[in-house]
Amino acid sequence: MSLKIYNTFTGKKEDFVPVVPGHVKMYVCGVTVYDRCHMGHARAGVVFDFVYRSLKFLGFETTYVRNFTDVDDKIIKRASERGITCDELVDENIKAFYEDMDSLFLKRPDHEPRATRYIAQMQDIIKTLLAKGLAYEAGGDVYFAVEKFPEYGNLSKRHLDEMEAGARVAVNEGKNNPLDFALWKAAKPGEPKWPSPWGEGRPGWHIECSAMGRDLLGEEFDIHGGGKDLVFPHHENEIAQSQGACGKPPARYWMHNGFVNINKEKMSKSLGNFFTIREVTQKFDPEVVRLYLLSTHYRSPIDFADEYLREAQGTLDYLYRALHRAEILPGFDYNFDPNKADEISDNILEKLKGALEDDFNSATAVALLHETAKKLNLAVSSVKHNSVGISYVSVAGYYSALRRIGDVLGLFNYEREGYFKRITVFHLREIGISEYEIQTLVDRRDSARKLKNFIEADAIRDKLLNKRIEIEDTQFGTKWWVHR
RNA sequence: GGCGCCGUAGCCAAGUGGUAAGGCAGGGGUCUGCAAAACCCUCAUCCCCGGUUCGAAUCCGGGCGGCGCCUCCA
């Protein structure tokens, strides 16, 4: 099998054929940096990070571009409300963006262009469009004339006459057609501005992606991604501009991720039902958030609720426990020769490949995570019970396969016991008990058990359980952890 | 009003022509002093009605229900 990608443009899953064999060029719309990122941004970020990791896993060389929109109406408005400059606002939010996205273990794209650094390239495109008669000037503004571009509406599957009938389009006196959109906006007093052949002003929203995509990836690249809400008008307009100027659509495959919902409704600022990334990662480990977001296919909507995150948390605990059990096995070798485990891991990774090639099916990859962890647990317990040499090979095979799946999903970033230490510290502070206190109680219970004083031992266990500390008696001694 | 998506077990969620992945919850076990953890077993015929087909959750038509876009938005 080979990679198949659902293309919004055709509405079908298609065989993926890159412009340059073996090399994928991908452009994903980033954020407008006027505020902190919410879970919707997290989903788009995680989804395309997963796509990026998948492409690499599948053996493609990949060039990934994700932009920042750092000039825009909302930025101007917010900066003036707060009494700071646009630059200050932008810098602050880019910094916050990196804190949030880094916390979610997103790999940095190869290029992260900012719109304001591409003013000249945008103006070049606008000049071309004017020269071709696809755009017109109106009092310092420049608009794209949608009627001059016959393919307009092909991406979002709508037609000009239908949209005009919709009548929800704002009327602007400068425009010939209410659906025409701004390529260049004349500057109002106090706004950021750049000189141009049409007077001082600033670029319209859509033109930046046309300019940056072309500059960094060329006139025709492979994948263009973003949230579903960008299909219209943003990507539709981007195609109009780029194709209008260059003669061909900028990208071959258009990928759009579904929304994050709250109670089945779109999370949005206007509904006031949104959560910022930092609010969520304060309650749940970022890897839990990743695992949850990837447990549903990227095109489907995903409902967001603590209850669901808690389930993902349970799964992540289970996975880390399985890894940990293998790691503490006497004689476990982190540097085990992977060739010896080939048959096992190859088989699993072949399945992973199948899932990724099927339009990046992360949900199936997550299922594979479960299956592999279960087999790892079995292999570990068989080693414990009869120490047959061959089982070590199985342990190594399942262990490395599990980690490999985790890599593609962006999980298991915490080394060895790091994950458990992290959640322990996090929750103990919340519960208000120290590790020392816990260990003292655990030791007292062990003494009681040795004397077969089970009433005392169980009383201590209950006491710990009340503090959400769970006890596990193993052949290697008594372990405890925070029950979440 | 136009366009589009979706409807799989109590819940979450894959599967898009050959007789339903995975997870949570539930039930029954193994292990354990008892637990916990882990493992094993168990738990659906795919919104409704027609049609195409040897065969459909999967294709077509019609309903019903939910959601999204058409305005800034991941």
Image: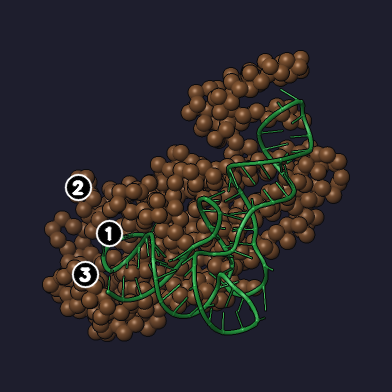
Colour of chain B in the rendered structure image? green
For label 1, the SS is: loop
Which quarter of the figure is the C terminus of chain A placed in?
A: top right
Left or right of A290? Residue A231 is: left
Q: Which residue is mark 1?
A: A71
Q: Which mark is residue A337?
A: none
Chain that is coloured brown in the picture = A
Q: Residues within 10 Å of mark 2 (few under 14, many from 20)?
A: few
Q: CB under 8 Å between callouts 1 and 3?
A: no
Quadrant hosting residue A388: top right
Residue A392 in view (yes/no): yes
Label 1 or label 2, whichever comes before in sequence order: 1
> Residue A13 in the image: x percent, y percent?
52, 74
Q: Which mark is residue A169?
A: 3
Q: Amino acid at mark 1?
A: Val
> Residue A236 in the image: x percent, y percent?
34, 73
Residue at 37% across, 55% down: A265
Query: To which chain does the residue with label 1 belong?
Result: A
Of circles 1 and 2, which is in front? 2
- Between A452 and A76, the one lying in front of the other is A452
**Disc 3/disc 2 C-alpha distance (Å):** 27 Å
Q: Amino acid at mark 3?
A: Val
Left or right of A286? Residue A402 is: right
For label 2, the SS is: helix
Of circles 3 and 2, which is in front? 3
> Residue B71 in the image: x percent, y percent?
26, 65
Query: To which chain does the residue with label 3 belong?
Result: A
Quadrant hosting residue A442: top right
Q: Which residue is mark 2?
A: A81
Label 3 or label 2, whichever comes before in sequence order: 2
- Between A170 and A22, the one lying in front of the other is A170
- Between A216 and A466, the one lying in front of the other is A466
